[in-house]
Image (cartoon, rainbow, N blue to C red):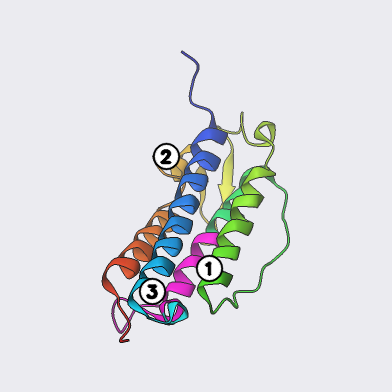
């Protein structure tokens, strides 16, 4: 049996998480339509007072995927403004991030298992550490927060 490819672990995990976020946004849209609620009110909704809204959760998940891919490939891409305020804009942001994952060449990532990546906290760690079992807790956390917002946070009609 072949070994585990770093590309599959990183890009594969990112793709799954982003598809879940897209599905959550689609379900929120369907729920809002069914209940007669303004779906865009969800973008500014947070689970609790000291939490950032759904729009922030989606933006951070997207930025984490994007920056992780930059670190792994060594190719820094363009910066994206974090200015989404509607569910449609958030869905477009997730789709844009999914499209970015499709452009990554597996050969630029595979074989880097022994490399180090520089983190913003000025700590250098072996590549597999932040990518196993999930590339980063951040996309997963924000994916789950998005799910919880869709499930529990219901704006008043």
Count residues near mark 3 (Cα–Cα under 10 Å), then give few for <14, some for 14-19, many for 20+.
many
- The answer to whether the residue labelled 3 contacts the one labelled 2, judged by CB atoms less than 8 Å apart, is no
Q: Which of 112/32 is in front? A: 32
What element does badge 1 sit on? helix
Residue 81 picture quarter: bottom right
The answer to whether the residue labelled 1 contacts the one labelled 2, judged by CB atoms less than 8 Å apart, is no
Q: Of helix, strand and loop, which one carries label 3?
A: helix
Q: CA distance from mark 1 to mark 2?
A: 22 Å
Q: Could you tell whether 143 is left or right of 106 in the image? A: left
Image quadrant containing the C terminus: bottom left
Disc number lying in front (1 or 2):
1
Q: Which residue is mark 2?
A: 132
Residue at horizontal 59%, vertical 57%? Answer: 95
From the top left corner, tell me how far across and down residue 4 is, in percent. Answer: 48, 26
Q: Residues within 10 Å of mark 2 (few under 14, many from 20)?
A: some
What is the residue that sits farthest to the top in this orientation? Answer: 1
Give the residue at x 59% y 64%: 93
Residue identified by numbered label 3: 32
Q: Residue at x 56, y 60 (%)?
A: 94
Asked if residue 63 lies left or right of residue 142, the reply is right
Q: Nearer the viewer, residue 93 or 51?
A: 93
Give the structural element (helix, strand or loop) at label 2. loop
Question: Would you call the spot at circle 1 few (<14 residues within 10 Å), some (14-19), or many (20 or more)?
Answer: many
The residue mark sitting in front, 3 or 2, is 3
Query: Nearer the observer, disc 1 or disc 3?
Result: 3
Up/down of 149 relative to 100, above or below: below
| In the image, residue 125 above or below residue 146 | above
The circle on residue 59 is: 1
Residues shaded magenta: 42-63
Residue 62 in the magenta stretch? The answer is yes
């Amino acid at each position: 049996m072949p070994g585990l490819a770093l590309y599959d672990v990183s890009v594969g995990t990112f793709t799954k998480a982003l598809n879940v976020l897209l599905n959550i946004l689609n379900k929120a849209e369907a729920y809002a339509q069914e209940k007669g609620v303004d779906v865009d009110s969800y973008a500014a909704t947070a689970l609790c007072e000291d939490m950032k809204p759904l729009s922030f959760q989606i933006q951070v998940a997207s930025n984490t995927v994007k920056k992780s891919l930059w670190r792994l490939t060594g190719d820094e891409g363009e910066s994206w403004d974090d200015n989404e305020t509607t569910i449609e804009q958030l869905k477009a942001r997730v789709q844009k991030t999914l499209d970015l994952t499709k452009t990554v060449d597996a050969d630029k990532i595979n074989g880097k298992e022994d490399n180090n990546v520089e983190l913003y906290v000025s700590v250098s760690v072996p590549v597999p550490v932040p990518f196993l079992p999930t590339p980063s807790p951040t996309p997963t956390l924000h994916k789950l927060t998005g799910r919880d917002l869709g499930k529990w946070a219901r704006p008043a009609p």
